[in-house]
Image (spheres, rainbow, N blue to C red):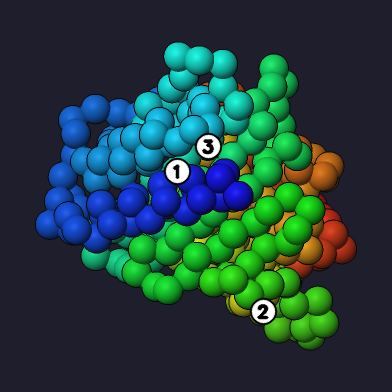
Amino acid sequence: MTLLKDLRKAAAIAKKTVLDNLDDSTKKTGSENPFGDKTLLLDQSAEDEIIAVLRESSTIYSVLTEEQGIVQSEEKPEYLAVIDPIDGSANLERGIPLCCVGISAVPFADNMTTDDVEISIIDSFFTDEIYIAIKGQGATLNGNRIRPVMKRDDKKIIISYDTKRPLVEDFGRQSLQTLQTVHDMRRTGSNLLDLCWTAKGALDAMIDLRGILPIVHVSGTHMVCEAGGYVVNSEGNRFRQSFDMDTRMSFIAARDESLARELLKSFSR
């Protein structure tokens, strides 16, 4: 499949770019990306390499990136590639080996949503983990099918919970309510890895209800859905969002719908 080959090649070159240039891990470009974050030199370099790979393909891509925003193709695009070149940039700056690249491909149309994602790939930079989700075909880790763990004792639920820069009123109180309902929490600082670990059953859920996460992280929610998990938005509806620069993700991705709604209920009390 040409599409999968393109995404695998693009992810691999991004990973190589980062690992070959770790001495530059703290360097900034001096500019901010469209989402208001200061751009790491390696973020920009990895993103440039991904776009170059996609431009060389026989498939025509328009691109939505974390660092450059919308990059249009000169010809009519066949797919929208949604790119997060380094998820876990702060970890990389500090020498914490928890970061990855995430890329999704969506058939190009006037109105594209997260339901339309055809393929996603998430490649961990420092561990041997390549996750692939294909619409209607499930999700894999290094070629082996993954699924959430459905029968785990509810008293042993462990979740990932993102608390960075909360903008929601009463977020602290609501977060405490949620965390008090589970056994424990983990947070890697890479939402995509946390979502992958939810997809494979290492975590029971990943929560980000801040309303500030860019849509470039869609490869992670796609991974959970294809693995057999369930994702709800902050209003309690099944997660479904459009692709544009103003879209922000707010969700609970869990092993099943029941747990997702239970966690949202605890947050919303």
Amino acid tagged 1: Asp
Quarter occupied by residue 173? bottom right
Regarding mark 3 in the picture, which secondary structure is present there?
Answer: strand
Q: Are marks 3 and 1 in contact (CB under 8 Å)?
A: yes
Measured along the vertical axis of the image, is residue 168 above or below residue 226?
Answer: above
One can see residue 233 in this view? yes
Residue with the most extreme right position:
258
Q: Residue at x 59, y 30 (%)?
A: 79
Of 210 and 93, nearer the camera is 93
Return the residue nearer the eye: 116 or 157: 116
Q: Number of marks in the image?
A: 3
Q: Is residue 43 left or right of residue 188?
A: left
Place residue 139 in its image quadrant.
Answer: bottom right
What residue is disc 2 on?
183
Element under disc 2: loop
The residue drawn where x is 19% and y is 34% is 29
Q: Nearer the viewer, mark 3 or mark 2?
A: 3
Name the amino acid type tagged 3. Answer: Val
Q: CA distance from mark 3 to mark 2?
A: 34 Å
> What numbered label is drawn on residue 84?
1
Q: Residue at x 56, y 16 (%)?
A: 76
Q: Which residue in the protein does label 3 denote?
A: 82
**Mark 2 or mark 3, which is nearer the start of the sequence?**
3
Q: Rate crowding at label 2 as few (under 14), some (14 to 19) or many (20 or more) other CA atoms within 10 Å.
A: few
Task: Determine the CA span between mark 3 and mark 1.
Answer: 7 Å
Between marks 2 and 1 in the image, the one whose residue lies nearer the viewer: 1
Task: Reply above or below: 44 against 242.
Answer: below
Residue under the image location 45 percent in, 60 percent down: 123
Looking at the picture, how far across and down is residue 54, in whole percent? 43, 36
Q: In the rendering, which numbered label is found on residue 73?
A: none
Q: Position of residue 168 (x, y in %)?
A: 60, 39
